Image (spheres, rainbow, N blue to C red):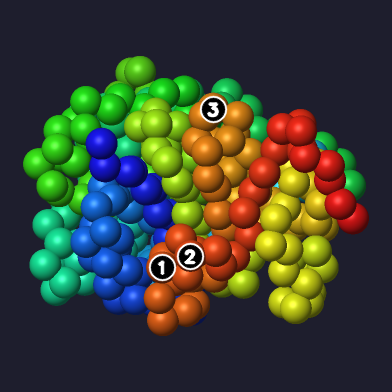
Protein backbone atom coordinates (compact mmCIF):
# COMPACT_ATOMS: atom_id res chain seq x y z
CA UNK A 1 0.00 0.00 0.00
CA UNK A 2 1.35 3.43 -0.98
CA UNK A 3 2.50 5.74 1.76
CA UNK A 4 0.42 8.87 2.30
CA UNK A 5 2.02 12.21 3.02
CA UNK A 6 0.12 15.36 4.03
CA UNK A 7 2.03 18.56 3.28
CA UNK A 8 1.02 21.84 4.89
CA UNK A 9 2.26 24.94 3.08
CA UNK A 10 2.08 28.26 4.91
CA UNK A 11 1.20 31.59 3.39
CA UNK A 12 4.56 33.35 3.90
CA UNK A 13 5.93 35.07 0.79
CA UNK A 14 9.29 33.29 1.25
CA UNK A 15 7.64 29.89 0.75
CA UNK A 16 7.60 29.40 -3.03
CA UNK A 17 4.57 27.45 -4.34
CA UNK A 18 6.45 26.42 -7.49
CA UNK A 19 9.18 24.71 -5.47
CA UNK A 20 6.64 22.98 -3.23
CA UNK A 21 4.67 21.68 -6.21
CA UNK A 22 7.80 20.41 -7.98
CA UNK A 23 8.60 18.43 -4.86
CA UNK A 24 5.08 17.04 -4.64
CA UNK A 25 5.55 15.72 -8.18
CA UNK A 26 8.83 14.13 -7.05
CA UNK A 27 7.14 12.63 -3.99
CA UNK A 28 4.43 11.07 -6.14
CA UNK A 29 7.13 9.61 -8.41
CA UNK A 30 8.49 7.74 -5.36
CA UNK A 31 5.13 6.04 -4.81
CA UNK A 32 3.58 8.39 -2.25
CA UNK A 33 0.01 9.57 -2.32
CA UNK A 34 -0.16 13.27 -1.44
CA UNK A 35 -2.58 15.74 0.12
CA UNK A 36 -1.71 19.45 0.15
CA UNK A 37 -3.21 21.73 2.80
CA UNK A 38 -2.53 25.46 2.53
CA UNK A 39 -3.11 28.72 4.31
CA UNK A 40 -2.60 32.17 2.85
CA UNK A 41 -2.11 34.83 5.51
CA UNK A 42 -0.24 37.23 3.22
CA UNK A 43 -2.96 37.16 0.55
CA UNK A 44 -5.69 37.43 3.18
CA UNK A 45 -4.02 40.55 4.59
CA UNK A 46 -3.52 41.98 1.10
CA UNK A 47 -7.17 41.52 0.17
CA UNK A 48 -8.34 42.90 3.52
CA UNK A 49 -6.32 46.06 2.91
CA UNK A 50 -7.63 46.42 -0.66
CA UNK A 51 -11.22 46.06 0.53
CA UNK A 52 -10.80 48.24 3.60
CA UNK A 53 -11.54 45.43 6.07
CA UNK A 54 -9.73 45.99 9.39
CA UNK A 55 -7.12 43.38 10.32
CA UNK A 56 -7.34 42.45 13.98
CA UNK A 57 -5.71 39.78 16.09
CA UNK A 58 -6.92 37.98 19.19
CA UNK A 59 -4.43 36.95 21.86
CA UNK A 60 -5.67 33.93 23.79
CA UNK A 61 -5.05 33.49 27.48
CA UNK A 62 -2.41 30.84 26.63
CA UNK A 63 -0.49 33.38 24.57
CA UNK A 64 -1.33 32.14 21.07
CA UNK A 65 -2.48 34.74 18.54
CA UNK A 66 -5.18 34.19 15.93
CA UNK A 67 -7.00 36.21 13.32
CA UNK A 68 -10.21 37.94 14.42
CA UNK A 69 -12.65 36.61 11.83
CA UNK A 70 -15.76 38.74 11.93
CA UNK A 71 -18.25 38.41 9.05
CA UNK A 72 -16.36 40.80 6.77
CA UNK A 73 -13.04 39.08 7.41
CA UNK A 74 -14.62 35.66 6.85
CA UNK A 75 -15.60 36.81 3.36
CA UNK A 76 -12.02 38.02 2.77
CA UNK A 77 -10.65 34.63 3.90
CA UNK A 78 -12.93 32.81 1.47
CA UNK A 79 -12.06 35.17 -1.38
CA UNK A 80 -8.30 35.02 -0.86
CA UNK A 81 -7.93 31.29 -0.21
CA UNK A 82 -10.49 30.03 -2.70
CA UNK A 83 -10.01 32.67 -5.39
CA UNK A 84 -6.25 33.26 -5.40
CA UNK A 85 -4.11 30.91 -3.31
CA UNK A 86 -5.78 27.63 -4.21
CA UNK A 87 -5.82 28.25 -7.99
CA UNK A 88 -2.13 29.19 -7.72
CA UNK A 89 -1.28 25.77 -6.28
CA UNK A 90 -3.53 23.88 -8.70
CA UNK A 91 -1.91 25.73 -11.60
CA UNK A 92 1.64 25.02 -10.41
CA UNK A 93 0.77 21.33 -9.96
CA UNK A 94 -0.65 21.21 -13.48
CA UNK A 95 2.64 22.60 -14.81
CA UNK A 96 4.46 19.55 -13.40
CA UNK A 97 1.78 17.15 -14.72
CA UNK A 98 0.12 16.52 -11.36
CA UNK A 99 -3.70 16.39 -11.51
CA UNK A 100 -5.13 18.32 -8.57
CA UNK A 101 -8.52 19.50 -7.33
CA UNK A 102 -8.99 22.45 -5.01
CA UNK A 103 -11.45 22.12 -2.15
CA UNK A 104 -12.27 23.93 1.06
CA UNK A 105 -13.34 22.22 4.24
CA UNK A 106 -16.90 23.19 3.32
CA UNK A 107 -17.03 21.15 0.12
CA UNK A 108 -19.02 17.93 0.61
CA UNK A 109 -18.72 18.57 4.35
CA UNK A 110 -15.03 17.61 4.29
CA UNK A 111 -14.08 19.29 7.55
CA UNK A 112 -16.79 19.63 10.16
CA UNK A 113 -16.22 22.19 12.89
CA UNK A 114 -18.03 23.72 15.82
CA UNK A 115 -18.13 27.50 16.00
CA UNK A 116 -16.84 28.89 19.26
CA UNK A 117 -19.73 30.58 21.05
CA UNK A 118 -17.35 33.12 22.55
CA UNK A 119 -13.65 33.83 22.24
CA UNK A 120 -11.69 35.05 25.22
CA UNK A 121 -8.88 37.42 24.36
CA UNK A 122 -6.43 39.46 26.39
CA UNK A 123 -6.54 43.23 25.85
CA UNK A 124 -4.31 45.49 27.94
CA UNK A 125 -3.93 42.75 30.53
CA UNK A 126 -7.68 42.15 30.83
CA UNK A 127 -9.65 39.16 29.55
CA UNK A 128 -12.34 40.31 27.12
CA UNK A 129 -15.12 38.18 25.62
CA UNK A 130 -15.56 38.44 21.83
CA UNK A 131 -18.84 37.20 20.35
CA UNK A 132 -18.55 38.04 16.63
CA UNK A 133 -15.63 35.73 15.83
CA UNK A 134 -16.50 33.19 13.13
CA UNK A 135 -13.79 30.75 14.16
CA UNK A 136 -14.26 27.09 14.86
CA UNK A 137 -12.82 23.97 16.41
CA UNK A 138 -12.41 20.98 14.09
CA UNK A 139 -14.51 18.01 15.15
CA UNK A 140 -14.01 15.52 12.33
CA UNK A 141 -12.84 15.00 8.78
CA UNK A 142 -15.11 13.15 6.35
CA UNK A 143 -12.65 11.06 4.38
CA UNK A 144 -14.58 9.14 1.65
CA UNK A 145 -14.26 11.88 -0.97
CA UNK A 146 -10.56 12.36 -0.20
CA UNK A 147 -9.95 8.62 -0.46
CA UNK A 148 -11.78 8.49 -3.81
CA UNK A 149 -9.65 11.36 -5.12
CA UNK A 150 -6.45 9.69 -3.96
CA UNK A 151 -7.52 6.38 -5.49
CA UNK A 152 -8.09 8.25 -8.77
CA UNK A 153 -4.54 9.66 -8.61
CA UNK A 154 -5.77 13.21 -7.93
CA UNK A 155 -4.05 15.43 -5.35
CA UNK A 156 -6.55 17.16 -3.05
CA UNK A 157 -5.58 20.80 -2.39
CA UNK A 158 -7.40 21.80 0.79
CA UNK A 159 -7.85 24.95 2.84
CA UNK A 160 -10.16 26.60 5.37
CA UNK A 161 -12.92 27.43 5.96
CA UNK A 162 -14.64 24.44 7.54
CA UNK A 163 -18.39 23.95 7.87
CA UNK A 164 -20.71 23.55 10.86
CA UNK A 165 -23.54 21.05 11.27
CA UNK A 166 -26.01 23.76 10.23
CA UNK A 167 -24.05 24.73 7.13
CA UNK A 168 -22.23 27.84 8.29
CA UNK A 169 -18.68 28.68 7.24
CA UNK A 170 -16.14 28.98 10.05
CA UNK A 171 -12.48 29.85 9.86
CA UNK A 172 -10.14 27.19 11.24
CA UNK A 173 -6.38 27.13 11.53
CA UNK A 174 -4.75 25.53 8.47
CA UNK A 175 -2.06 23.81 10.58
CA UNK A 176 -4.73 22.17 12.70
CA UNK A 177 -6.65 21.25 9.56
CA UNK A 178 -3.55 19.55 8.15
CA UNK A 179 -3.07 17.61 11.38
CA UNK A 180 -6.73 16.57 11.43
CA UNK A 181 -6.61 15.43 7.80
CA UNK A 182 -3.38 13.48 8.39
CA UNK A 183 -4.94 11.74 11.38
CA UNK A 184 -8.22 10.94 9.62
CA UNK A 185 -6.44 9.48 6.59
CA UNK A 186 -3.90 7.54 8.70
CA UNK A 187 -1.07 9.37 6.93
CA UNK A 188 2.46 8.08 7.35
CA UNK A 189 3.95 11.60 7.37
CA UNK A 190 2.86 15.17 8.08
CA UNK A 191 5.26 17.78 6.70
CA UNK A 192 4.62 21.35 7.90
CA UNK A 193 6.51 23.92 5.83
CA UNK A 194 7.27 27.32 7.31
CA UNK A 195 9.56 30.34 6.89
CA UNK A 196 12.16 28.99 9.34
CA UNK A 197 14.64 26.10 9.24
CA UNK A 198 12.52 24.19 11.75
CA UNK A 199 11.65 24.58 15.42
CA UNK A 200 14.14 26.98 17.00
CA UNK A 201 15.31 26.66 20.58
CA UNK A 202 15.64 30.47 20.48
CA UNK A 203 13.02 31.99 18.12
CA UNK A 204 15.40 34.85 17.35
CA UNK A 205 18.31 32.61 16.28
CA UNK A 206 17.93 30.46 13.15
CA UNK A 207 21.14 28.65 14.06
CA UNK A 208 19.36 27.18 17.11
CA UNK A 209 17.20 24.81 15.04
CA UNK A 210 16.46 21.53 16.81
CA UNK A 211 16.82 18.25 14.87
CA UNK A 212 14.26 16.79 17.29
CA UNK A 213 11.73 18.62 19.44
CA UNK A 214 9.99 16.71 22.21
CA UNK A 215 6.45 17.83 22.96
CA UNK A 216 4.12 16.83 25.75
CA UNK A 217 0.81 18.42 26.71
CA UNK A 218 1.69 21.82 25.30
CA UNK A 219 5.24 21.91 26.67
CA UNK A 220 8.25 21.62 24.37
CA UNK A 221 12.02 21.67 24.24
CA UNK A 222 11.93 25.11 22.61
CA UNK A 223 10.60 28.57 23.38
CA UNK A 224 7.52 28.71 21.17
CA UNK A 225 5.74 31.81 19.97
CA UNK A 226 3.23 32.85 17.31
CA UNK A 227 2.67 30.55 14.37
CA UNK A 228 5.36 28.10 15.47
CA UNK A 229 3.48 27.41 18.70
CA UNK A 230 0.36 26.55 16.71
CA UNK A 231 2.34 24.28 14.37
CA UNK A 232 3.95 22.38 17.23
CA UNK A 233 0.66 21.99 19.09
CA UNK A 234 -1.06 20.78 15.89
CA UNK A 235 1.84 18.40 15.26
CA UNK A 236 1.55 17.00 18.77
CA UNK A 237 -2.12 16.29 18.18
CA UNK A 238 -1.26 14.43 14.98
CA UNK A 239 1.27 12.32 16.88
CA UNK A 240 -1.26 11.57 19.63
CA UNK A 241 -3.82 10.42 17.07
CA UNK A 242 -1.52 8.01 15.28
CA UNK A 243 0.53 9.88 12.66
CA UNK A 244 3.98 8.30 13.08
CA UNK A 245 6.09 11.08 11.57
CA UNK A 246 5.65 14.85 11.92
CA UNK A 247 8.27 17.28 10.62
CA UNK A 248 8.39 21.08 10.79
CA UNK A 249 10.65 22.11 7.93
CA UNK A 250 12.02 25.03 5.96
CA UNK A 251 9.67 25.98 3.14
CA UNK A 252 12.14 28.50 1.67
CA UNK A 253 14.42 25.90 0.10
CA UNK A 254 14.63 24.94 -3.58
CA UNK A 255 13.43 21.44 -2.60
CA UNK A 256 11.55 21.94 0.68
CA UNK A 257 9.52 18.72 0.79
CA UNK A 258 12.41 16.56 -0.38
CA UNK A 259 14.70 18.06 2.25
CA UNK A 260 12.13 17.36 4.96
CA UNK A 261 11.62 13.77 3.81
CA UNK A 262 15.38 13.24 3.79
CA UNK A 263 15.93 14.37 7.38
CA UNK A 264 15.86 18.16 7.25
CA UNK A 265 13.95 20.40 9.61
CA UNK A 266 12.72 19.36 13.06
CA UNK A 267 11.11 16.01 13.78
CA UNK A 268 8.49 16.24 16.51
CA UNK A 269 8.36 13.44 19.04
CA UNK A 270 6.19 12.95 22.10
CA UNK A 271 8.18 13.26 25.31
CA UNK A 272 6.00 10.51 26.80
CA UNK A 273 7.00 7.98 24.10
CA UNK A 274 9.88 6.68 26.16
CA UNK A 275 12.22 9.42 24.99
CA UNK A 276 13.98 11.64 27.45
CA UNK A 277 13.60 15.34 26.79
CA UNK A 278 16.71 17.43 26.50
CA UNK A 279 17.33 21.10 27.22
Q: Which mark is residue 258?
A: 1
Horizontal side, residue 23 vs residue 178: left or right = left
Which SS class for mark 3? loop
Q: Count residues near mark 2 (Cα–Cα under 10 Å), then give few for <14, some for 14-19, many for 20+.
A: few
Residue on which the image places disc 2: 262
Of 133 and 32, nearer the camera is 32
In the image, what residue occupies the spot 14% across and 73% down? Answer: 95
Q: Which mark is residue 37?
A: none
The reply to whether discs 2 and 3 touch (Cβ–Cβ < 8 Å) is no
Horizontal side, residue 229 vs residue 2: left or right = right
The reply to whether discs 1 and 2 touch (Cβ–Cβ < 8 Å) is yes
Residue 150 at x, y percent in the picture: 19, 41
Which SS class for mark 1? helix
The quarter of the image holding the C terminus is: bottom right
Locate residue 169: give its quadrant. top left
> Could you tell me if residue 274 is visible in this image?
yes
Marked residue nearer the N-terminal end (2 or 3):
3
Which mark's residue is nearer the viewer, 2 or 3?
A: 2
The quarter of the image holding the N terminus is: top left
The reply to whether discs 3 and 1 touch (Cβ–Cβ < 8 Å) is no
Q: CA distance from mark 3 to mark 1?
A: 25 Å
Which mark's residue is nearer the viewer, 1 or 2?
A: 2
In the image, what residue occupies the spot 40% across and 38% down? Answer: 187
Which SS class for mark 2? loop
In the image, what residue occupies the spot 34% across and 76% down? Answer: 19
Horizontal side, residue 111 vs residue 195: left or right = left
Locate residue 271: give its quadrant. top right
- Against 273, is 69 above or below? below
In the image, what residue occupies the spot 40% across and 54% down? Answer: 7
Of 114 and 251, nearer the camera is 251
Count of numbered labels shown in the rendering: 3
Q: Which mark is residue 241?
A: 3
Amino acid sequence: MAELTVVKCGGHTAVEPRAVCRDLAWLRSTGHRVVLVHGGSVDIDRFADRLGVPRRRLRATNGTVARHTDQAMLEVVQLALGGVVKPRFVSELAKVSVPAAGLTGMDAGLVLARRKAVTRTVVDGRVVVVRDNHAGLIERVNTPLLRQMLASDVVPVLSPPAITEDGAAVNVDADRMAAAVASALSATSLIMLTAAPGVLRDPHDEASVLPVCHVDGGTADAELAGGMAVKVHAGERALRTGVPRVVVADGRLDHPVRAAMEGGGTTLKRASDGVRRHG
